[in-house]
Image (cartoon, grey):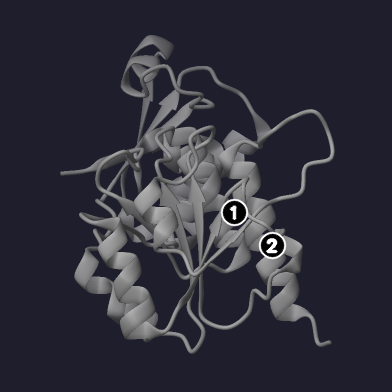
């Protein structure tokens, strides 16, 4: 069974990273855009079939998404499972993991995946329940990062966190407004997992209890919280900063 992706960035990313996954491309009739023309030339050079379609058909297929005049059928992405976690951990000496608890909006999931890819996260863990699907919307927002960062859905998040700590010695840092110290006061080096909760609700109680440490993001203005994807980017790149700091 094939999947669909849409949008210029998503198509460009698949061409760069996994062109063999492309099956068929659908192009909006009479759409003239320099970026789109360049992309179409690349697709044609790969020998991929391109079908010209009208706007209603493309809107219907993408469920009203911002498709930018192009959509593609691709071979299904690799599905990762809980038992893949040890193998993914052993691929690196200092695993860097993102855990998302209760992120139910595909736009936010896609943005988190994009930040994770940019920050060098090895893989992302989400619960099977109360989590956004990795659908075409999430993949478009991720701008191709969904093809490079494994997303693993687990049945029991607390049990998985316990396994990370006990079997792989990974330090788990959760974000919570009530934490007694900030992200910038924490030592974020070595084998590490960052846990982000849902916007508003935050992490679930059991998830919070399985963290080794809780930190907050200092807020100077009147806004009490940040969008989860923005907060995720801040936390991940503080880890990057500390890992690259020689002092």
Of the pair 153 and 200, the residue shown nearer to us: 200
Q: How many marks?
A: 2
| Residue 29 horizontal/vertical position (percent) | 46, 18
Residue 239 is situated, as x and y percent measured from the top left of the image, at 66, 69
Q: Is residue 45 above or below residue 98?
A: above
- Mark 1, Cα crowd under 10 Å, few <14 / some 14-19 / many 20+, is many
Q: Secondary structure at mark 2?
A: helix
Visible residue check, residue 68: yes
Residue in the image at 75% along x and 67% along y: 185
Question: Which label lies toward us, 1 or 2?
Answer: 2
Kindly indicate whether the residue at mark 2 contacts the one at mark 1 (C-beta within 8 angstroms).
Answer: yes
- Residue to which mark 2 is pinned: 237
Q: Mark 1 to mark 2: distance in Å?
A: 9 Å
* Left or right relative to 7: residue 154: left
Disc 1 is placed on an element classified as helix
Residue 43 location in percent, x, y?
Answer: 45, 47
For the C terminus, give its image quadrant.
Answer: bottom right
- Horizontal arrangement in the rendering, residue 247 relative to residue 4 (left or right): right
Q: Is residue 127 above or below residue 240?
A: above
Q: Is residue 41 visible?
A: no
| Label 2: how many Cα within 10 Å (few below 14, some 14–19, many 20+) | some
| Residue, far left | 1
Query: Which quadrant would residue 226 be assigned to in this image?
Result: top right
Where residue 195 sits in the image (x, y, percent)? 49, 57
Residue depicted at x 32% and y 55%: 21
From the image, tell me which residue sits under label 1: 115
At horizontal 63% and vertical 61% (from top left) the residue drawn is 236
* Residue sitting at x 35%, y 53%: 206
Nearer the N terminus, badge 1 or badge 2?
Answer: 1
Q: Quadrant of the N terminus?
A: top left
User: Closest to the observer: 210 or 196?
Assistant: 210
């Amino acid at each position: 069974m094939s999947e669909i992706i849409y949008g210029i960035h998503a198509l460009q990313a698949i061409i760069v990273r996994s062109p063999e996954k492309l099956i068929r491309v659908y192009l909006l009739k009479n759409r003239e855009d320099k970026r789109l023309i360049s992309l179409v030339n690349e697709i044609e050079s790969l020998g991929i079939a391109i079908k010209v379609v009208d706007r209603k058909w493309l809107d219907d297929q993408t469920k009203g998404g911002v498709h930018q005049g192009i959509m593609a059928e691709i071979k299904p992405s690799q599905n990762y499972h809980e038992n893949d976690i040890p193998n993914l951990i052993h691929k690196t000496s200092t695993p860097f993991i993102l855990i998302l608890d209760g992120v139910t909006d595909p736009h936010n999931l896609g943005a988190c995946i994009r930040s994770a890819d940019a920050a060098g996260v090895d893989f992302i863990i989400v619960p099977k329940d109360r989590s956004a699907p990795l659908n075409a919307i999430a993949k478009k927002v991720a701008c191709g990062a969904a093809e490079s960062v494994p997303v693993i859905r687990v049945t029991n998040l607390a049990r998985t966190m316990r396994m990370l700590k006990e079997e792989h010695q990974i330090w788990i840092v959760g974000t919570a407004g009530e934490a007694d110290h900030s992200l910038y006061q924490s030592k974020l080096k070595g084998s590490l997992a960052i846990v982000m909760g849902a916007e508003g609700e935050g992490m679930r109680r059991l998830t919070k209890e399985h963290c080794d440490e809780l930190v907050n993001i200092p807020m100077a203005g009147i806004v009490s919280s940040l969008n989860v994807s923005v907060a995720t980017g801040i936390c991940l790149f503080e880890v990057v900063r500390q890992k690259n700091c020689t002092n």
